[in-house]
Image (spheres, rainbow, N blue to C red):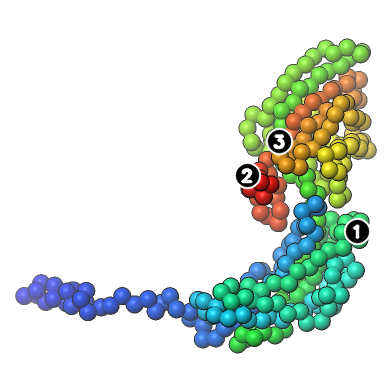
Amino acid sequence: MKHLFILAAIVLCLSGCKYNDDYLAPRLDQTIAYFASATSYNRTLIVGEGLYFKIGAAMAGVKENPKDESVYMYISREPLGGGKELMPKDYYNSSELGGVIEATIPKGEFLGYFTVKMDSLKFLNDPESLSGRYALPVKLVDTSLESINTELDSILVTVKYMSGVDGYYLYESTVKKEVGGSITDTKTEKYPNESDNSAWRLETKAPFTVQVSPAVNSSANGVKFNLTVKGSAVTYESIAGQPVVEADGSNTYDSKTRDFELNFKYKDNQSEAVYHVSTKLIFRNRMVDNFNQTREYLSYFNK
C-alpha cells in the first residue's frame, strides 16, 4: 500500500507539475548601466592597423533591448597616481570628447560606445606612448536607463602602441661560416617544433622598429639587432655591445603573409669568423592585451 501511495504521488507530480522557465527571466527589478570590463584595462594599438579604439558601457536588467537607450560618460582630467599620467589632450580627439559624451545603445543590443582617435604624429613620436604610462579615466554620469551601478561606474583605460611586425616567428635558415675570406662550413636549420625556444622574438622599440632576438635553438642565438620595417623595405641597425649586423643580400617583409625574407651577416668578436645568415621568418603569433592572435586568426582579416 505504501508503494502504491509513492507511485501515485510521482504520477501526480509528473502530470500536474508544469515546466517553469521563470528562472530565465532577469532577476533585476530595473535596467542598469555599468562598465562590463574591470576597473582598469589596457588598449594596445597596432601601428598600421588603425590608431583608434572604442570605450563603451553596457546595460543589464532585461533579456532583450526593445529600444535605443543612451549612456553618458565623461573623461576626467584629474591627475592620476600609480605611475599613470593623463593622456595629453592633443594626442587624441579631445575636442570631440570634451564634456559629457553621449553613446547610444542601439535597439536589440546591450553596449554603447564612443571612439577615441589618436593623433598618429604626436602619439607615435612620444617614447612614453610605448610604456603604457598614458591613460584615460572614464566615468558614467547619466543614462536613459533606470539607474547606474555605482560600483561599476568608472574605468581607467591605459593606452600604448605596438609595431605591426611585433610577434613570434618560426624560422628556416641557411648559415654559412666564413674564415679568412673562405666559406668553411654551411648548414641548414629549421624550427624543430613551435615552442618559444624555436621562435625568433621581434619586440617593439619604436613605431616601425623592433629588436630581434633569434630563437634559442638557432645558430644566431644570442645575437640581437634592430630591424626597421616600412612597407616591404627592411633595414638593419646594430645594438651597442652586440656584434655588428649588416644586410647581406635582399631583405623583404610580406604584409600579406606577415613573413620575412632576411639576409644578413655578423662577425663573431671572439673567433673573428663571419656568419652569413639567410632565413625565412614565419609568423607564428603575437600577444595583444593578453589575447593570443595566431597566424590563422590574423589570416582571416587578410583575405
Marks 2 and 1, how far apart at CA:
31 Å
> Disc 2 on helix, strand or loop?
helix
- Mark toward the start of the polypeptide (2 vs 1): 1
Q: Position of residue 237 (x, y in %)?
A: 91, 37
Q: Give the left or right position of residue 194, taking residue 165 as reference.
A: left
Residue drawn where x is 18% and y is 74% of the image: 10
**Label 1 crowd bin: few (<14), some (14–19), many (20+), radius 10 Å:** few
Q: Earlier in the sequence, mark 1 or mark 3?
A: 1
Q: Nearer the viewer, residue 107 or 32?
A: 107
From the top left corner, tell me how far across and down residue 24 is, in percent. 43, 75
Q: Which mark is residue 258?
A: none
For the residues labelled 3 and 2, the Cα–Cα distance comes to 12 Å
Image location of residue 30, percent across then percent down? 55, 86
Q: Secondary structure at mark 1?
A: helix
Q: Residue at x 91, y 30 (%)?
A: 246
Q: Report the residue that reaches farthest toward the left.
A: 1
Query: In the image, what residue type sits under mark 3?
Result: Ile
- Taking the image as shown, residue 266 lies to the left or right of residue 72, namely right
Q: Examine the image and state in which quarter residue 17 appears.
A: bottom left
Q: Which residue is mark 3?
A: 282
In the rendered structure, find residue 296 and report the number of the disc placed on it.
2
In the image, 138 versus 302, the foreground residue is: 302
Along the line of sight, the residue nearer the viewer: 53 or 236: 53
Seen from the viewer's position, the closer of residues 224 and 276 is 276
Q: Which residue is mark 1?
A: 121
What amino acid type should be assigned to the residue bearing mark 1? Leu
